[in-house]
Image: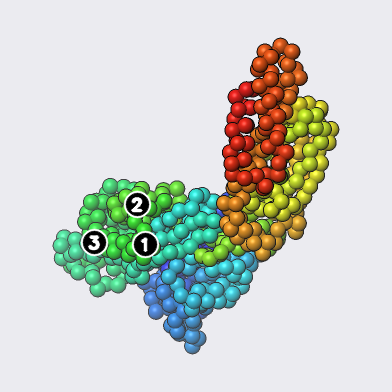
Amino acid sequence: MSAIGIDLGTTNSCVACVEGGNPEVIVNAEGERTTPSVVAFTKDGERLVGTVAQRQTAMNPARTISSVKRQMGTDWRKDIDGKSYSPQEISAMILRKLRRDAERFQGQDVKDAVITVPAYFNDMQRNATKDAGTIAGLNVLRIINEPTAAALAYGLDHGDPQMVMVYDLGGGTFDVSIIEIGDGVIEVLSTAGNNHLGGDDFDERLAKHLIDAFQRTSGIDIAHDAMARERILEAAEAAKRELSSAESTVVSLPYLAQGPAGPVHLEQTVTRAEFDRLTHDLVDSTTDAVNQALNDAGIAASELGAVLLVGGSTRIPAVQEHVQRLTGKRPSSSINPDECVAQGAAIQAATLAGARSGCTDLMPRGGELLLLDVIPISFAIETVGGVATRVIERNTTLPVHYEQIFTTAAPFQTKVEINVMQGERPMAADNKTIGKFTLKGIKRAPAGTPQINVSFDIDANGILTVRAQDLGTGNEQSITITDSERMTDSEIQDAIRDAERYEEEDNARRASMEERNDAERLVAEAQEKLKAHGKEMEKDDKRRLKASVANVQRYLAKRPEKMKDAERANFSNAITELKSLL
Ligand code: AMP
């Protein structure tokens, strides 16, 4: 059973699920990728949802409900045939249809869902949305913010930390949010907008223009003819969509009205320039909200990492140009503005549903809690001198494969111990060992010669397999570590806190350890050289090299934590000198 993501919109809704690792929009029973958020009750008591409900609006306005999202969390009621319906119940009818469409698409029952709401929705509105889901028979895993979902769809959950603007202009609402992304958390910093601005207003402007033009040419005023008006509005909406890609379009409505000489038709060409002129103040009116959102978030437009467009009306070229002018940034065109919110919700739903079946459960601090399949804490292996060498950084997204070649530290070493750890500290002793194994049978060779390939694989369920292979002999050894052996949430939090607290101290210790390792390697190299080529070397060179080795060894014999600053400096000089002689 696959979890779904639902964008329960004011004008249109959309449902998606993750299939084969990708968020897929579910095509509804009518063959459309979005479903109008319209519910109607026919005279004979049938309930209609979606396009069929929308189509009969003009004939049945009193029993047709659209934009019920605006009423969520209020005591609004709709009385139909003696029954009083709450906004939750009407929304549940839309959700139930989306659920059925998803079931048909998946060929199985669907229960788990993530539903999105505008970032500005308060607790009551969010609870009402959740209740609507429950009434529709859904198990609502989480309610998430629409801009957050858009960011998830855009794939911003595993990039660098950044500030992003989500500019969402739908059918009846406009909102702009500034969100901060980083560390597996997406946080809405500010939101502003206008609850009564959207594509419908653009339709109205164009419809009025057509009605006026019709009156000028035919002398007939159809402003008060409900049926003709509805036809004009529909045609205006279609023309508006066409003008998003074409420079001009023809609106053609045969038999629009009855004149003294018989039926009168409307045929009118509209250019994009004309449309832009009719609607430019609507586009301009989004400026204040953009500035306010930036102000409230305390950032300048230049600090934005990306601008995402959401909502069907952002397909209007003049809107896109306006956003670019305001932010100085080209809006991202890689996501579909009508579908990305549902897709992001589907990604979150899949992750949440997956988490219950054993995925890594990341609960970051603050912000909107997102559950991403990421590694909450770094993986490392212990290398010479007790240093923890990071192999996979914290917050890397699953699944992940990593490999690195290591070598031996001592001459003729025939085995190595692989100590697998989790933690953020640079020294092995300060991290938690989660597994250990020994790779034996390494071919005898001088230090630094064998090549040992160590690979880490963490699958989507968080199961880690570490393999070590001696490339010289092909000998291989591995272990598998499951989630339960890994660190618990509180251990993780402690580790992160410790890492911050001890950062400076740790770095100094690591630098000192690395220096010692360097020194040991140089000493071994010098001894090799003396053994192999000692006879051919100039007497003076040989003496200098031997003295330098002895000098370095003298410092190596001391305990690093007991060394004074001056001694440390002399040790560094001794190493530099030895290096110069090799
Ligand atoms: P939404 O609420 O996001 O589904 O947005 C719906 C609004 O987007 C409606 O007003 C549509 O007319 C409008 N819309 C959809 N496609 C386009 C398009 N290609 N060009 C302009 N507006 C569009």
Q: Nearer the viewer, mark 1 or mark 3?
A: 1
Up-down: is 77 above or below 126?
below
Residue 552, position as x, y percentages in the image: 67, 32
Looking at marks 1 and 3 on the same chain, the residue that comes earlier in the sequence is marked by 3
The residue singled out by tag 3 in the image is 281
Name the amino acid, label 3: Asp
Q: Residues within 10 Å of mark 1 (few under 14, many from 20)?
A: few
Residue nearer the viewer, 154 or 443:
443
Separation of residues labelled 2 and 3 (CA atoms): 25 Å
Name the amino acid, label 1: Gly
Hey, which residue is sitting farthest top in the picture? 536
Secondary structure of residue under mark 1: loop
Locate residue 133: give its quadrant. bottom right
Residue at the image point whose x is 71% and y is 33% from the top: 553
Residue at the image point whose x is 58% and y is 76% from the top: 135
Name the amino acid, label 2: Ser
